[in-house]
Each structure stands twice: as structure tokens, then as C-alpha cells.
Image (tube, rainbow, N blue to C red):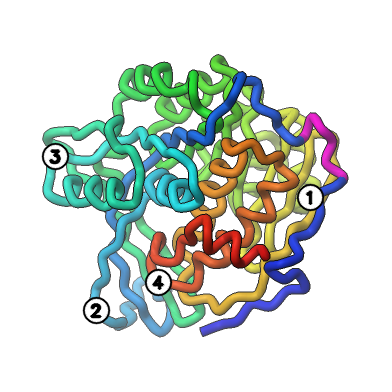
């Protein structure tokens, strides 16, 4: 186990007082509800805990196989639901027993899966994950039905759900066309949109003008910076350049170092992560994004929502599995207070 220590403690989240009112992303939807619409992938995670991560061509022997629900979209949906939001998930699973089980698990977690397409002839997405003794991981994903999610289905579902939504969260483990239609529909409906570019697809650059709140990690920020021009090499400078293009904040997750927030006008704030015992970092970013979306949908401004999401993500790494440590609203409140 590894203990990550930082100056900030749960009860004293740092202030983002330098954020301007415009940077706090007020929803333009009248009477926005605490409803989050998530568009993204649904997987089953097959996890082996090993003493270390294997190198190229290397075999490392670990413990027994463990199976968990996964996929960035599904994980974030569970995190948002546990944080207290009403959550609708749009995505696809295969017409197989794995897909049926995945949907049952999501329903049990409080996620509305009535807009998840079940695709006959497709397999449900699977992620193969190795976790080492420090909680770091390697992940390979077989997209399955996630690669075939119907774009028209996403459009139709969003047009039904967006009039009462407080936030849309889009992740990029689905086809570029699906990502594009989700961001475009949110933009047209004037509902705030979080775009988690994991992985970074070229379509993300095309969508910057739609003003999503981008939530890359450090490596994804570098990849995105390369797509918009030569990467400067500084996370702050790269985030400032991209924020100037979106006219909205860029929120960079940095693992145990916390979260870097860069506003549209270039103001920089670092929200440190609290100290926790790390068992598995899988799903930490998904937890952050889901809780961030939930808090924004509930009416929080970005200055309030980010520290809460940082605490939630920190709590999530204390258990094995992407969803095992995702905290409830009561657990987040207790940690904050």
C-alpha cells in the first residue's frame, strides 16, 4: 500500500476565489435539475492484482481474476448517482449475458439505463486491467458494442432528456461521431457539457468551439496540445492555450497531486488531493468526472464543485475496482466536514 500525503486535508478544501462569475459556468437552462446525462462506454473489467506491471513481452503472475463493472461512461454514471444526482446513461451493450449483467449492476447502483441500446450480434465491451502493489494500472480495452453505439439513438435520447438536464458528461471511449453529436446536442440545448478526452480523439479539437469543460489528465492534455499545435510542455501553459480556445475552464486531473484548474482568462488554481491509502487508481478519474457533473447539475459553481470532486476521487482509490471505493453523498459530506 502507498500513502499519498499533501498539505490539504478533507475538511479544508482550497478556495478557487480567483474564478470569475463567468468561469463558474452557470446553466442557461431555467430551473436546471440535479439530473446528469452521461454518454459513454459500458464495459466489464477483468482485473488481476500483480506485484508489478509487466513490461513489453513479459509475463507477471498475480492473484486470481476479479470481475467488476467498468467503462468510463458507466463508471462516471455510478459516481454521479452515488453523489446524489438523477443519472441517465446513454450507450450500448451487446446482446449477451455479460451485457445483461452489466445493466443489472448499473440499475442496482441507481443509474437509469433505459436509454442503453442492446445490440444483437455485438459483444459487450471488456477491459483487461493489471494493478500493481502501488495501485497503478495498465488497461487494454476491447470496445465491443461501444464501437457500434448508434449515433441516431444518442441524438434521439438527448433531445428527450436535455430539457430537464443540469449537465451532460461525455467520454471518448465511443466513436468520434457519437462524441460529436453528444457535445453538439448539449451546445444547442444550452446545457453545460463536460468532455473527458480519454482517449484524445481528433474530433475533440473540432468540438473546442462548442465550449465544453475539458477534463484531461496530464498525458491527455499533452496529446490534446499536440493536436492544436506544438505542445508547450507545461501543463499550465498548455491548459491556458486550450482554455482560450474553448472560452471555458480546463480542469486537469493530476493523480495524487490533485487538480489544476485554468479558467478562460488564464487564472490558475491548484486543488491538492487529500492524503489517502491507495489500493487501486482505476476509476479515480471517472469518479472525479461523475461527481463534478453531479455537483454542477445540483447548482454548484465550479469553485465549489471541484474540491468536492477531488475528495470523492481520493476516496475512490482506497478500494480495488473502478467502482468499489466510489463514495456516497453522505461519505463525501463526512470527509469534507
At which x and y percent is residue 48?
31, 73
Q: Earlier in the sequence, mark 3 or mark 1?
A: 3
Q: Residues within 10 Å of mark 1 (few under 14, many from 20)?
A: some
At which x and y percent is residue 3?
60, 81
Residue under circle 1? 236
Q: Earlier in the sequence, mark 2 or mark 4?
A: 2
Which numbered mark, 2 or 4, is in the foreground of this view?
4
Asked whether the residues under the numbered discs 2 and 3 touch, taking CB atoms below 8 Å apart as contact, a structural biologist would say: no
Q: Any magenta on residue 175?
A: no
**Residue 95 tag number:** 3
Which numbered mark, 4 or 1, is in the foreground of this view?
4
One can see residue 326 in this view: yes
State which quarter of the image contains the C terminus. Answer: bottom right
Q: Residues within 10 Å of mark 2 (few under 14, many from 20)?
A: few
At which x and y percent is residue 140?
36, 57
Residue under circle 2? 64
Q: Which residues are magenta?
A: 18-23
At which x and y percent is residue 87?
42, 39
Residue under circle 4? 320
- Asked if residue 104 is positioned above or below residue 297 in the image, the reply reads below
Q: Marks 2 and 4, how far apart in space?
A: 13 Å
Q: Any magenta on residue 21?
A: yes
Which residue is depicted at the point 66% across and 63% down? 336
Secondary element at image label 2: loop
Amino acid at each position: 500500500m502507498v500513502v499519498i500525503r499533501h498539505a490539504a486535508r478533507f475538511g479544508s478544501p482550497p478556495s478557487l476565489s480567483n474564478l470569475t462569475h463567468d468561469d463558474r459556468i452557470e446553466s442557461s437552462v431555467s430551473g436546471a435539475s440535479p439530473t446528469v446525462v452521461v454518454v459513454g462506454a459500458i464495459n466489464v473489467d477483468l482485473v488481476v492484482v500483480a506485484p508489478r506491471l509487466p513490461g513489453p513481452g513479459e509475463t507477471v503472475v498475480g492473484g486470481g481474476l476479479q470481475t467488476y463493472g467498468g467503462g468510463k461512461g458507466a463508471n462516471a454514471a455510478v459516481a454521479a448517482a452515488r453523489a446524489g444526482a438523477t443519472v441517465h446513461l446513454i450507450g450500448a451493450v451487446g446482446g449477451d449475458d455479460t451485457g445483461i449483467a452489466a445493466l443489472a449492476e448499473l440499475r442496482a447502483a441507481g443509474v437509469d439505463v433505459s436509454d442503453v441500446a442492446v445490440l444483437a450480434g455485438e459483444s459487450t465491451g471488456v477491459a483487461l486491467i493489471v494493478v500493481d502493489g502501488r495501485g497503478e494500472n495498465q488497461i487494454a480495452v476491447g470496445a465491443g458494442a461501444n464501437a457500434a453505439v448508434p449515433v441516431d439513438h444518442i441524438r434521439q435520447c438527448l433531445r428527450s432528456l436535455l430539457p430537464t438536464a443540469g449537465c451532460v458528461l461525455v467520454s471518448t471511449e465511443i466513436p468520434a461521431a457519437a462524441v460529436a453529436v453528444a457535445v453538439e446536442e448539449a451546445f444547442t440545448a444550452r446545457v453545460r457539457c463536460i468532455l473527458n478526452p480519454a482517449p484524445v480523439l481528433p474530433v475533440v479539437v473540432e468540438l473546442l468551439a462548442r465550449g465544453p469543460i475539458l477534463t484531461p489528465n496530464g498525458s491527455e492534455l499533452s496529446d490534446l496540445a499536440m493536436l492544436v499545435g506544438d505542445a508547450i510542455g507545461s501543463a499550465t501553459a498548455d491548459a491556458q492555450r486550450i482554455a482560450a480556445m474553448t472560452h471555458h475552464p480546463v480542469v486537469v486531473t493530476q493523480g495524487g497531486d490533485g487538480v489544476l484548474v485554468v479558467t478562460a482568462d488564464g487564472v490558475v488554481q491548484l486543488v491538492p488531493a487529500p492524503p489517502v491509502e491507495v489500493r487501486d487508481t482505476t476509476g479515480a478519474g471517472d469518479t472525479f468526472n461523475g461527481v463534478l457533473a453531479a455537483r454542477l447539475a445540483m447548482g454548484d459553481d465550479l469553485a465549489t464543485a471541484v474540491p468536492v470532486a477531488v475528495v470523492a476521487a481520493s476516496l475512490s482509490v482506497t478500494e480495488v475496482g473502478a467502482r468499489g471505493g466510489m463514495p456516497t453523498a453522505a461519505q463525501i459530506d463526512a470527509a469534507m466536514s
